[in-house]
Image (cartoon, rainbow, N blue to C red):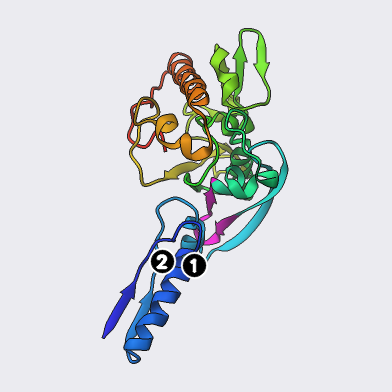
Amino acid sequence: MRILIAPDKFKGSLSAQQVAENIALGIRDVIPDAQIEIAPVADGGEGTAEVICKARGGEWVTCHAHGPLGNPIEARYVWLSENASAVIEMSEAAGLRALKDGVRDVLRANTFGVGEMLLDGAKRGAREIIVGVGGSVTNDGGFGMARALGFRFFTGKREIENGGPAELIGLARIKVPLAAGVSPATSLKSESASTSGGPLQIRIAAACDVKNPLLGQNGATRTFGPQKGATPDELEILERALTRLADTVTRELGCDFRNNPGAGA
């Protein structure tokens, strides 16, 4: 008998690989001569990089980054040299593991460290970066990540140089970095030169398994905010902040993703 075992993780207890191995042990106790193949799967959350690393023969690399509340961390991600791709888990720099002493503050927590990981992948020469967006303790709409990539945010004349989503309530203007070119939401400048001598455009893909919009009752804040420790009052602040961010992005950059499936992942 041939049996394929392809589970996802058991969140908070076992990785997908560990789940598969334990299922295999149980099957072999009952069917000793079974031909078992293990093929763990992932949904964009924690464990996604591990699954891709094993399936594609990648290697783990590390970089300096900052956790959700600004504490220095060592973050790791998967590098696939055969096609110059990086696989990053958002939770590595914006999840529970990156919090100092487990202290949460959803109004201050930000994704700056995720942007630092993207930059490290770009400096390594990545042509594609896959970002698993599950397992974070942040609710900043990617504001911190964008700051790390060179985007600048202003409330009137004052620049927002640190902090979390609460700072976005007064957002008035966004300045796009020159390296972002004509597609600031999806492009990075790599230090590796293209054949024409210009900057390489890197394809960035977000891996997720939900279709929530950014705002509203089924949006990021209402659906996932309570899981991240937000109180009812904090949920109101976060919703206002993300609404202001979406409005400003639409006005300043000419793109409106708030209702796209998965925008609230």
In this rendering, does residue 125 appear at all?
Answer: no
Looking at the rendered structure, the secondary structure element under dot 1 is helix
In the depicted view, which residue is nearer to us: 256 or 5?
5
Q: Is residue 150 magenta?
A: no
According to the image, label 2 marks what residue?
A: 40
Q: Position of residue 185 (x, y in %)?
A: 48, 30
- Residue at 49 percent across and 63 percent down: it is 15
In the rendered image, the vertical position of residue 171 relative to residue 262, given as above or below: above
Residue 18 falls left or right of residue 1: right
Residue extending furthest front? 232
Considering every residue shown, the one lying at the far bottom of the view is 33
Q: Which mark is residue 54?
A: 1
**In the image shown, does 255 or 140 lie closer to the viewer?**
140
Q: Position of residue 72 (x, y in %)?
A: 73, 43
Rendered location of residue 18, percent (x, y): 48, 70
**Side of 65 relative to 166 (left or right):** right
| Relative to 40, residue 155 above or below | above
Q: For the residue marked with disc 1, what is the amino acid?
A: Lys
Residue 93 is drawn in which quadrant?
top right
| The residue positioned farthest toward the right in the image shown | 72
Label 2 crowd (10 A; few <14 / some 14-19 / many >=20): many
How far, Cα to Cα, is label 1 from label 2?
9 Å
Q: Main secondary structure of the magenta part?
A: strand
Q: Residue at x 72, y 40 (%)?
A: 71
Mark 1 or 2, which is nearer the eye?
Answer: 2
Magenta region includes residue 78: yes
**Which contiguous range is marked in magenta?**
77-90
Whether the residues at callouts 1 and 2 have beta carbons within 8 Å, the answer is yes
